[in-house]
Every structure is written in structure tokens, then in C-alpha cells.
Image: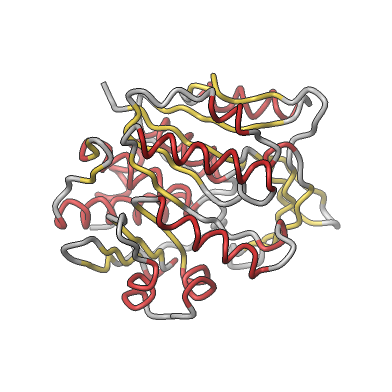
């Protein structure tokens, strides 16, 4: 059986469209997208932990996770709260502009994360959106401490959303302060510059590296991705595709990466060789590229069979 993977963080409703044409609701939230991505690939032991409102949006998000084989035992329903909405306007090249109506995702409490059973978990995947309020930040820190004690591998995708923070510098400080507590971090090009001031992936990755780090990945959009371990580094090119919607591409990358490397996680250690890491990043890059060919994160996430056909046609 596959090892237990816990995706912790926000579930949101991504509303795509425009003021002129209206908006269409889609499943969203980086950890939720990653969980669904893992489920669609066939991973049989994926759990989601987070907080949503008591509204019909929350019911729909919960059911979507379950439909794709994700266990939602640790999804908390705040009956007096609302679910976060993210309005997403797309440009012609599929890039996004966000406007958030924040809800329950950043109201998770320390007690609620204390209730998450980490026994047998190989991986905890999380981001910064549950660090934007004092209460949620404390809850996330507690979960990280518990995961460290339980020797659960911690993977951090900051997923920078400046609109949810009072000042950019506050977000930067929170992310940098979190790095010593994690084993892997994945950022995109813009996030690399934001956090390190560096444009070159190799130089930026070095600046992100901390003593407990085992893997740093910088995704480069249409140019692929750069990876770094303690023993090496490499760059993987992306297949050429005509992107329709880049929403969820980074989350798909996370799903592809950890679907491939989950078997190499043992007691908080990544035991993969550099060749195996390179192959996993290549799989993740291809998965992310395939995801951009459809609108909506969940709709774009492929099954393993779809992924194999795509890889065969882009050798």
C-alpha cells in the first residue's frame, strides 16, 4: 500500500471568468489540488487537512476530494463561517490575476491541527496561506513540530499570494522563518526573486538552502525546472505546449514529484539518488505541462494513463 501523504492548508473556490462574462466556480486551493492530483494518479493513501465554512461551497469541495479518493477526516467545517473564494481572471496566455474573499481557511486552530494523526505518515505537504493569521500560524507551527517529532518529511510550497498579507515583507519573513523547519521547498521564478533577490535558479536555491533541507526545486514555467540536493543539481526542460490555463500547474508539479518520490521517503529522509530525483522532476514537469491544456485545476489534472500517453507523444 502507498505511504500516507497529508496535504494541509486551504481549500478555496476558484471563480474563473470576467466581470463582463461572469464567473464559473472551480475547485481550488494548492494543497487540495495536490491531493486531488495524487488521487487521480492512483495514490491510495492521500489525506486532506484544513478548514472550510459551513456553506454549500464547503460541501462541494469536500465531495470533490472524496470523489478522487482523498480522505477528508481532518477537514474541519466551521458552521458559522464561510469558505474562501478566489476570483481568477485569465490573460490570453493563461496567466492569472487574483482577487480574494477570505474565509475559514486561515482560521484553523492549534487544537484542530493537534487532532491530525501523523502516525504512519511519510509526507506533510503545506503552504503559506495557513500562516497569514496569528491563530493559523500557531496551528501550522504546531503541526510542523509534531511532524518533525514523528519523523514525517515536510515539503513546503509557499504559494505566494500577496493580496492575503498586510505587507509583502511580512510574508517574506514568515516564509524564510519556516524554511529551517522543512526538508523540501518548491518555489517558482517570481517567488525565488521575491525571497532571495536572485534570478538565477542555482544561486537562488543556494540562498534558500538550510541545514535540514534535502531538496530545493525552482519551477521555471515553460522552461521546465531546476532541482538541488545535498549531492547535486540539475535542470529539466519542459515539453512545448500551448497553455490554456496555468492555474494549478505548480500543484500538479507537487503531485507528480511526490507521487514518484513517496516510496523513497523513510523516517523523514529522502533516500532517492540524484538520478531518481531528476526523473521525478521530469515526470512532475510533464504533468504540470499537461495540466495547462484544460481550464480549472481539477479538470486539468491527469490520470496516470493520460500522463503516460502524453509522455509517449513528447519524447
Q: Is residue 244 left or right of residue 280?
A: right
Residue at left 39%, top 50%? 182
Q: Is residue 48 left or right of residue 290?
A: right
Of the pair 273 and 112, the residue shown nearer to us: 112
User: How many numbered marks have been drawn onto this rendered protein structure?
Assistant: 0
Of the pair 82 and 270, the residue shown nearer to us: 270
Q: Is residue 278 above or below residue 199?
A: above
Where in the figure is residue 84, as x and y percent of width and height? 73, 41
Where in the figure is residue 174, as x and y percent of width and height? 57, 59
Q: Is residue 134 above or below residue 4?
A: below
In which quadrant will I find the N terminus? top left
Q: Quadrant of residue 28?
A: top right
Q: Is residue 153 above or below residue 214?
A: above
Residue at left 39%, top 35%? 303
Where in the figure is residue 81, as x and y percent of width and height? 80, 31
Of the pair 191 and 260, the residue shown nearer to us: 191
Q: Is residue 82 left or right of residue 16?
A: right
Q: Is residue 44 above or below residue 223?
A: above
Q: Quadrant of residue 3?
A: top left
Where in the figure is residue 179, as x and y percent of width and height? 43, 57
In which quadrant will I find the C terminus? bottom left
Amino acid at each position: 500500500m502507498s505511504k500516507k501523504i497529508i496535504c494541509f492548508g486551504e481549500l478555496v473556490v476558484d471563480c474563473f471568468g470576467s466581470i463582463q462574462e461572469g464567473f464559473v466556480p472551480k475547485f481550488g486551493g494548492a494543497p487540495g489540488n495536490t491531493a486531488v492530483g495524487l488521487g487521480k494518479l492512483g495514490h491510495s493513501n492521500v489525506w486532506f487537512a484544513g478548514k472550510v465554512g459551513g456553506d454549500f461551497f464547503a460541501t462541494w469541495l469536500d465531495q470533490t476530494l472524496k470523489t478522487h479518493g482523498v480522505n477528508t477526516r481532518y477537514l474541519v467545517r466551521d458552521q458559522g463561517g464561510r469558505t474562501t473564494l478566489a476570483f481568477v481572471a485569465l490573460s490570453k496566455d493563461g496567466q492569472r490575476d487574483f482577487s480574494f474573499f477570505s474565509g475559514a481557511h486561515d482560521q484553523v486552530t492549534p487544537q484542530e491541527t493537534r487532532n491530525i494523526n501523523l502516525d504512519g505518515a511519510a509526507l506533510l505537504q503545506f503552504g503559506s496561506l495557513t500562516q497569514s493569521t496569528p491563530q493559523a500560524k500557531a496551528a501550522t507551527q504546531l503541526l510542523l513540530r509534531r511532524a518533525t517529532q514523528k519523523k514525517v518529511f515536510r515539503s513546503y510550497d509557499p504559494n505566494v499570494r500577496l493580496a492575503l498579507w498586510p505587507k509583502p515583507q511580512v510574508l517574506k519573513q514568515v516564509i524564510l522563518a519556516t524554511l529551517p523547519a522543512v526538508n523540501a521547498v518548491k518555489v517558482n521564478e517570481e517567488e525565488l526573486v521575491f525571497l532571495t533577490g536572485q534570478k538565477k535558479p542555482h544561486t537562488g536555491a543556494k540562498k534558500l538552502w538550510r541545514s535540514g533541507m534535502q531538496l530545493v526545486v525552482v519551477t521555471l514555467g515553460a522552461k521546465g525546472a531546476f532541482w538541488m540536493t545535498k549531492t547535486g543539481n540539475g535542470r529539466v526542460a519542459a515539453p512545448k505546449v500551448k497553455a490554456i490555463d496555468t492555474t494549478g500547474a505548480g500543484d500538479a508539479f507537487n503531485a507528480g514529484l511526490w507521487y514518484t518520490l513517496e516510496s523513497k521517503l523513510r523516517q523523514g529522509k529522502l533516500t532517492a539518488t540524484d538520478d531518481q530525483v531528476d526523473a521525478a522532476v521530469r515526470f512532475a514537469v510533464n504533468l504540470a505541462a499537461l495540466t495547462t491544456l484544460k481550464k480549472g485545476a481539477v479538470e486539468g489534472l491527469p490520470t496516470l494513463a493520460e500522463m503516460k500517453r502524453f509522455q509517449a507523444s513528447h519524447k
